[in-house]
Image (cartoon, grey):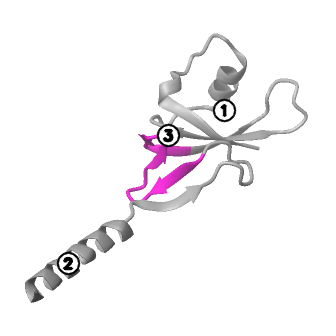
């Protein structure tokens, strides 16, 4: 009886430890502020969105053609050198110079 109780306690502790050990630092929820897609900051400094882990979170500011003021795009990317112009062009053109698998637009101001 005591052995079964100890095994149950050990199993409970393992399950509890597994549930509390999260790799997520912060979650940005879709619908909050300017967040368009839910994404997460991970403990190792990477970013996760839709089951893909990205190396970088970039805030890109610039002015779109015919715009009165600057816009800011937040993208999660595998490349550190993505530019505002590349993302803007990808959103408005059928000819895309940036591989969409390299980044995802998660916020827009």
Q: Position of residue 51 (x, y in %)?
A: 44, 41
Residue 8 shows which numbered tag?
A: 2
At 68% from the left edge and 21% from the top edge, which residue is drawn? 89
Which mark sits nearer the N-terminus, 3 or 2? Answer: 2
Residue 108 shows which numbered tag?
A: none
At 74% from the left edge and 53% from the top edge, which residue is drawn? 33
Q: Residue furthest top?
A: 95
Compared to residue 93, the image places residue 34 above or below, namely below
Marks 3 and 2, how far apart in space? 36 Å
Residue 50 shows which numbered tag?
A: 3
With 71 as the anchor, is 6 left or right in this view?
left
The secondary structure that most of the magenta stretch takes on is strand
Residue nearest the observer in this picture, 86 or 16: 16
> What residue is shown with label 1?
84
Which mark sits nearer the N-terminus, 3 or 1? Answer: 3
**Callout 2: SS:** helix
**Callout 3: SS:** loop
Q: Position of residue 29 (x, y in %)?
A: 63, 53
> In which quadrant will I find the C terminus?
top right
Marks 3,1: beta carbons within 8 A: no
Q: Residue 78 is drawn in which quadrant?
A: top left
At 47% from the left edge and 34% from the top edge, which residue is drawn? 79
Mark 3 neighbour class, 10 Å CA radius: few under 14, some 14 to 19, many 20 or more? few
Span shown in magenta? 38-57
Mark 2 neighbour class, 10 Å CA radius: few under 14, some 14 to 19, many 20 or more? few
Mark in front: 3 vs 1: 3
Marks 2,1: beta carbons within 8 A: no
Marks 3 and 1, how far apart in space? 22 Å
Marks 3,2: beta carbons within 8 A: no
């Amino acid at each position: 009886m005591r052995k079964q109780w100890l095994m149950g306690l050990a199993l409970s502790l393992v399950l509890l430890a597994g549930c509390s050990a999260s790799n997520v630092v912060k979650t940005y929820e879709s619908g909050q502020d300017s967040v368009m897609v839910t994404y997460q900051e991970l403990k190792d400094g990477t970013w996760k969105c839709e089951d893909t882990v990205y190396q970088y979170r970039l805030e890109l500011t610039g002015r779109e053609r015919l715009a009165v003021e600057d816009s800011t795009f937040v993208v999660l990317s595998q490349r550190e050198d993505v530019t505002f112009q590349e993302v803007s062009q990808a959103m408005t053109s059928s000819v895309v110079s940036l591989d969409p698998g390299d980044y995802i637009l998660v916020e827009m101001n």
